[in-house]
Image (cartoon, rainbow, N blue to C red):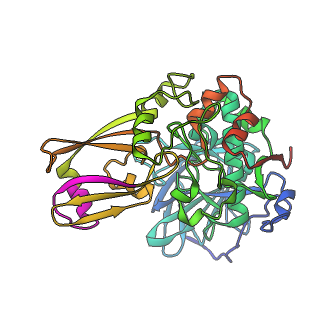
Amino acid sequence: MRILKVVSLMLFIAISDCGLCQSSTSFLQMNNPVIRVLISDSTADALITPTSPFSARTLEGEEILEVPPGLEISISRGDNSVILRDNASSYTTEALCMEPLDTDGSFILQKAGLDEKNPGRSYEGRLEIFPGEGGMLEVIIVLPMEKYLMGVVPYEIGPDSPIEAMCAQAVAARSEAFVALVTRKYAGKHHDICSDVNCQVFRGNERRSTGSDEAVTRTCGTVLLFEGQPVSAFYASNCGGHSEDIRNVWGDRSQEKSYWNSTGFDGKGMSNLDLTKEDDFLKWLDSSPDVFCNHEKYTTPAWTHKNFRWTREVEAGDLTKWISEIRDIGRVTAMRPVKRGVSGRMIEVEFIGEKGTLIVGPELKIRRLFKPSLRSAAFIIDPQGPQNRPDRFILRGAGSGHGVGMCQTGAIGMANQGKSFQDILRHYFPRAEIRTLYK
């Protein structure tokens, strides 16, 4: 076994030619910056099959071996090291780099946190692998911003969405990625951003389409700014007809001033209902408002139809069990809304049991209490069975997701009405400026 002593390189990141810009103004000069994406930290081994020539190297650039297309190599976690094996040999290094020898070189990655039945995912870019925590590998993709976004847009809004909706998604995702680079809010020792819903979904090449690539290319370098800084451009699947105030969803993000007083009816004009009030919220659920995410009013894909309005039946025994994981309040006999946000989403809900009560909030904790999680926290409760001891609860709700920022279903509805991506972004981010930083 060949041992390669490597002095750890802190960051391959020569973020383009301008370094990692963290001031409020220097990021404006970043030209298609490089971004490091964590794609796995939950496996101790991986299989990599290049579809074009790659060079396996140390992070300092010392070549270990050249890997031809089609040759499967295995990567495993050693003792504070990474072990590479091909058909004939094994090599141990402190960290490993797989560098494409072609401009658009790609590879298939298997078993890096994926279901073993999955045939793997295709990625482009430079692959960096480090020994991670808990005996696992940290698998990182390093690639230019615009190439990264081609692996985000089709997974976040769908590769067959109308082009203007995908353009709006590309700008929102680029803004969030710039925020990640500038603020380091998602950063780890070796990465700038993760690849799941905790950041934004990145899955490489598999779902890319001509349209989704075009959306990235057409909006190249375009971001959302507020007071000269990039906006965390949040988005969710379906707002249910009204967006939510960020301060009601994420208390730790309440400093995001671009979202203050920017929530609104997802249609033309205004609603005359106050969704913080129970009676008005019930009227809202029972109506079919003229909003862009309503499939009865605007053209949206079939997969969105189940999200605008939905019903869920919950057994009292199941609910009691889920509540007991937080606190034992005995058999649940009632649920009571305590406080709703401007979209009707519950900020706090009280569960009443035979031995006590429990208030749960904010909206994400409410959703996740249920198994599987609720589509959204915008729902009403209809107890079924004996009046003082119902045996089940019917929940009727609106929307899917947190409701902050852009409604992806509404963006599709707007695009199908002939609205431009600029129109869409101004509708959902009314306090933000749309600016092209580079082309």
Check the picture and name the quadrant holding the N terminus: bottom right
- Position of residue 78 relative to residue 236, above or below, is below
Q: Position of residue 120 (x, y in %)?
A: 50, 43
- Please name whichever residue, 103 or 310, is drawn nearer the observer in this view of the structure: 310
Q: Residue at x 39, y 51 (%)?
A: 367
Give the quadrant of residue 8.
bottom right
The answer to whether any part of residue 88 appears in the image is no
Q: Is residue 295 visible?
A: yes
Nearer to us in this view, 174 or 411: 411
Residue drawn at 79 percent across, 64 percent down: 14
Whether the magenta-drawn stretch holds residue 408 is answered as no
Among the 4 quarters of the image, the one containing residue 392: top left
Q: In terms of depth relative to the viewer, which is nearer, 245 or 112?
A: 245
Q: Is residue 221 above or below residue 362?
A: above
Residue 114 on image: x %, y %: 45, 49
Residue 97, x across and y down, in percent:
65, 61
Quadrant placement of the C terminus:
top right
Write the start and end of the magenta stretch as one range: 320-338
Please tell me which residue lies in front, 402 or 271. Answer: 271
Q: Quadrant of residue 292?
A: top right
**Is residue 409 found left or right of 104 in the rendered image?**
left
Left or right of residue 131, residue 438 in this image: right
Give the left or right position of residue 203, taking residue 379 as reference.
Answer: right
- Label count reads 0
Residue found at x 51% / y 39%: 273
Q: Position of residue 158 (x, y in %)?
A: 57, 33
